[in-house]
Image (cartoon, rainbow, N blue to C red):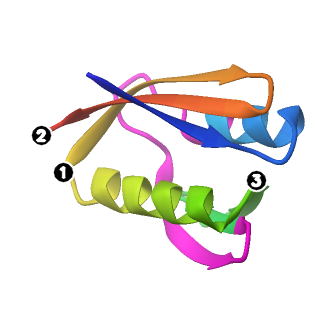
Amino acid sequence: MKTETFECEDSYEAKKLAGLLAVQKDNSIYVSRIAGAVKNEIIIMLKDKSSHSVTLKDDKNVWRLKSLVEDVVAGKKTISECLCKNHDSQVRISTQ
């Protein structure tokens, strides 16, 4: 199991990201895709078609998060847990 840490702009953004990536009862996540990314902001679309922006520390964190979400949606990786600590969201993942 591997842990990816994403640095957010503040603790509110870190909590929001951890909530959006939270594992559901059926061990899936509610994220359907990444709708866009601009500089240090990423737009996450959920399965209910709502969109939510998360502001990260920098564009490097945005591109790492985008890559992770794309791999999870494609079934290449699985999120097992999301934690929030200060300005960071920690995502535990496993590879399929």
Question: Looking at the picture, how far across and down is residue 66, in whole percent?
Answer: 48, 63
Where are the magenta residues, as a range?
19-41
What x and y, as percent, mark residue 85? 72, 20
Q: CA distance from mark 3 to mark 1?
A: 26 Å
Q: Specify the amino acid type for callout 2.
A: Gln
Return the residue at label 2: 96
Quarter holding residue 20: top right
Q: Are marks 1 and 2 in contact (CB under 8 Å)?
A: yes
Furthest-left residue in this view: 96
Which SS class for mark 1?
loop
The structure residue drawn at horizontal position 24% and vertical position 44%, both measured from the top left corner, is 77
Q: Residue at x 84, y 48 (%)?
A: 9
Which residue is tagged 3? Answer: 57
Give the Cα distance between marks 1 and 2. Answer: 5 Å
Is residue 32 visible in the rendered structure shown here? Answer: no
If the image is split into quadrants, where does the N terminus sit? top left
| Residue drawn at x 65%, y 67% as measured from the top left | 59
Q: Left or right? Give the position of 69 relative to 6.
A: left
Question: Does residue 33 sit above or below 3 in this rendering?
Answer: below
Q: Secondary structure at mark 2?
A: loop
Counting every numbered tag in the picture gives 3
Q: Which residue is identified by label 1? A: 76
| Foreground of the two, 57 or 75 | 57
Q: Quadrant of the C terminus?
A: top left
Foreground mark, 3 or 1, reads 3
Q: Is residue 18 visible?
A: yes
For marks 3 and 1, the one nearer the N-term is 3
The amino acid on which the numbered mark 1 sits, given as a three-letter code, is: Lys
User: Can you tell which quarter of the image residue 49 is in?
Assistant: bottom right
The mark closer to the camera, 2 or 3, is 3
**Which amino acid is tagged 3?**
Lys
* Residue 38 on the magenta segment: yes
